[in-house]
Image (cartoon, rainbow, N blue to C red):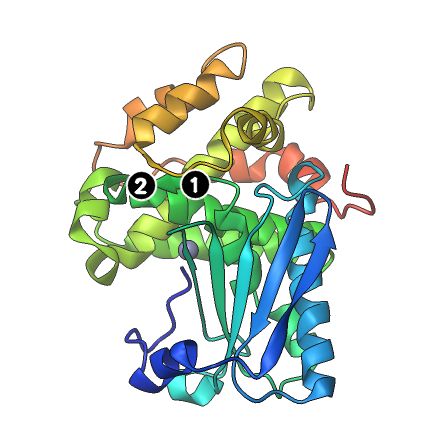
Amino acid sequence: MRSPALLLISAAALLALSADATVPSSVINIPGASIDLEIRGSVDQENTAKLKRWVSESAGQVLLAYGRFPVPEPRVVVVPSEGGRWGGDSAVPFGRVTRGGGETVELYVDVGRPLADLSADWTATHEFSHLLLPRISWQQKWISEGFASYYQNVLMARAGNYTTNQAIEKLTQGFGRGRGSRPELSLNDAAREGVRRARYKIYWSGAAIALLADVELRERSSGTESLDTVLDRFQRCCLPSRRSWSGTELFTKFDSLIEDPVFMPLYRQYANTAGFPDFEDALRSDVVRDEIFAVRTSTH
Ligand SMILES: [Zn+2]
């Protein structure tokens, strides 16, 4: 979920969701998926074409993980919404994934903003990145939010929307905020406290775990293994999934897909330990600049 400065979803926005769509839904085909796109409210032809292109490009960024979209028939609902209403200036002030009866990505969009503004906003990339994992227990929300926060930056860099330096800076800032947030809590404690009380701890501690796993996998295998390859294998065995996974169940499954475990050792080291994961050495690793954030010109 992307949470804007103003956390409550306005009644008007919820009403917009239940209103009849004035634009018929359309299908966007990308490798691995047929996306059912619905645009709510009154949106003219020009803006409809822009939104279709943006959704196609944003969803397409997920292909830069392992070459195909993780679930075959996602729904995307675009809800027109002015950024100012949410207490900020974001072109995409709010987004979330719901999974009842299949995956739906809701994106609240200031539809009058130019395509460049929409493309520069990370919200859609974050929400689509959630689909790389199944639904995770709320008790390990740091995994679902953390991996989406990590991939939102990785994919924006690979797509060329961030330079490598910008992506590294964004992770550095995020980890700094996360380390300063509720240091007395462990990752699982923070998830139990909830997003309102431990937001940065939840989002960025999980992103640090994703980085630590990714760097370790790449360094020990000279680049043949990575978080991308683990998620690729996981998709083949286990997605789409219609149930919730616990953190230990997911990480145990990930470890079964590689030679020597990486994920459960990280879980045992950090999930129930106060403080923040030690990310500094991993972030300085050559593989961050040379592999993880490197621009991809093809989906493989
Ligand atoms: Zn999220």
Left or right: 233 in relation to 145: right
Which quadrant of the figure has residue 271? top left
Residue 1 on image: x %, y %: 40, 59
In this orientation, does residue 262 appear?
Answer: no
* On screen, residue 57 above or below 172: below
At label 1, the amino acid type is: Ala
Residue 248 on image: x %, y %: 31, 26
Q: Is mark 1 within 8 Å of ligand 1?
A: no
Residue located beneath label 2 in the image? 276
Q: Is 246 in front, or is 200? A: 246
Q: Residues within 10 Å of mark 2 (few under 14, many from 20)?
A: many
Q: Is 14 in front, or is 108? A: 14
Residue 154 on image: x %, y %: 61, 48
Which quadrant of the figure has residue 64? top right
Number of marks in picture: 2
Left or right: 172 in relation to 43: left
Q: Residues within 10 Å of mark 1 (few under 14, many from 20)?
A: many
Q: Nearer the viewer, mark 2 or mark 1?
A: 1
Residue at 21%, 38% in the rendered image = 274
- As drawn, the label of residue 208 is 1
Left or right: 124 in relation to 7: right
Which quadrant of the figure has residue 24? bottom right
